[in-house]
Image (tube, helix red, strand yellow):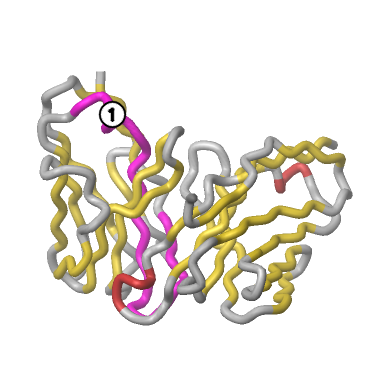
Amino acid sequence: GAGVSQSPSNKVTEKGKDVELRCDPISGHTALYWYRQSLGQGLEFLIYFQGNSAPDKSGLPSDRFSAERTGESVSTLTIQRTQQEDSAVYLCASSLVTGNEQYFGPGTRLTVT
Amino acid sequence: QKEVEQDPGPLSVPEGAIVSLNCTYSNSAFQYFMWYRQYSRKGPELLMYTYSSGNKEDGRFTAQVDKSSKYISLFIRDSQPSDSATYLCALTRGSGGSNYKLTFGKGTLLTVNP
């Protein structure tokens, strides 16, 4: 079946602009996670959704970062006033609510110039 | 001290070799242990996950967990050039809600030479 999809695959933006990154999880997966992968920090947790609620936002690095999920499906990660340090690969994963098996999308490579 | 330590390598082996990849962790709250494979410019792909101490085998891959030593390993037998990738260990606390969030090692870059 279809896996996790993310769009765009690549995004180049100027410092100070806002960006939106989209994730479509596997159908029926109620848990959705965003992670960020950068050269220096490796893969780090950003935010977790159970259904449309986000009980854990502890990994969001600043208040410029926000995310929402609608219809227990698609999620959007928004970064406002982008900075160069936001350059990274943003990965989305989904899993069944009780599962540890998280399945990742291909990621969005964000470059802030 | 990082919660999860993983030697970044790089590790280069000849085709057919046995590969050993390892992680150590500091927090005994971690209960679930996973290995992901990540090809260049792709998302991580789940290879193995296990809960208890001991070995779990799947084809050429064996995951080993020693909770008393807080040490996990992934062995690859008869390694192939197609195994060339970055291997990431990932751990979770595992019981409910956001305890499923993954804490990753930095990843080990493996190259298998034909």
Residue B20 place in picture, x, y as percent: 77, 54
Is B46 left or right of B84, judged from the image as shown?
A: left
- Left or right of A29 on screen, residue B43: right
Q: Kindly identify which residue carries mark 1.
A: A85
User: Residue placed at 69% from the left, 68% from the top?
Assistant: B63
Q: Residues within 10 Å of mark 1 (few under 14, many from 20)?
A: few
Where residue A11 sits: x, y (%)?
A: 28, 30
Which quadrant of the view contains residue A65? top left
Q: Secondary structure at mark 1?
A: helix
* Whether residue A33 is situated above or below residue B41 in the rendered picture: below
Q: Chain of mark 1?
A: A
The percent position of residue A68, horizontal first and vertical second, equals 13, 57
Q: Residue at x 40, y 42 (%)?
A: A37
Check residue A95 for magenta coloring: yes
* Left or right relative to A25: residue A51: left
On whether residue A31 falls in the magenta region, the answer is no
Amino acid type at circle 1 is Glu
Give the quarter of the figure containing the C terminus of chain B: top right
Q: Position of residue A15 (x, y in %)?
A: 17, 21
What span is colored magenta in the figure? A83-104
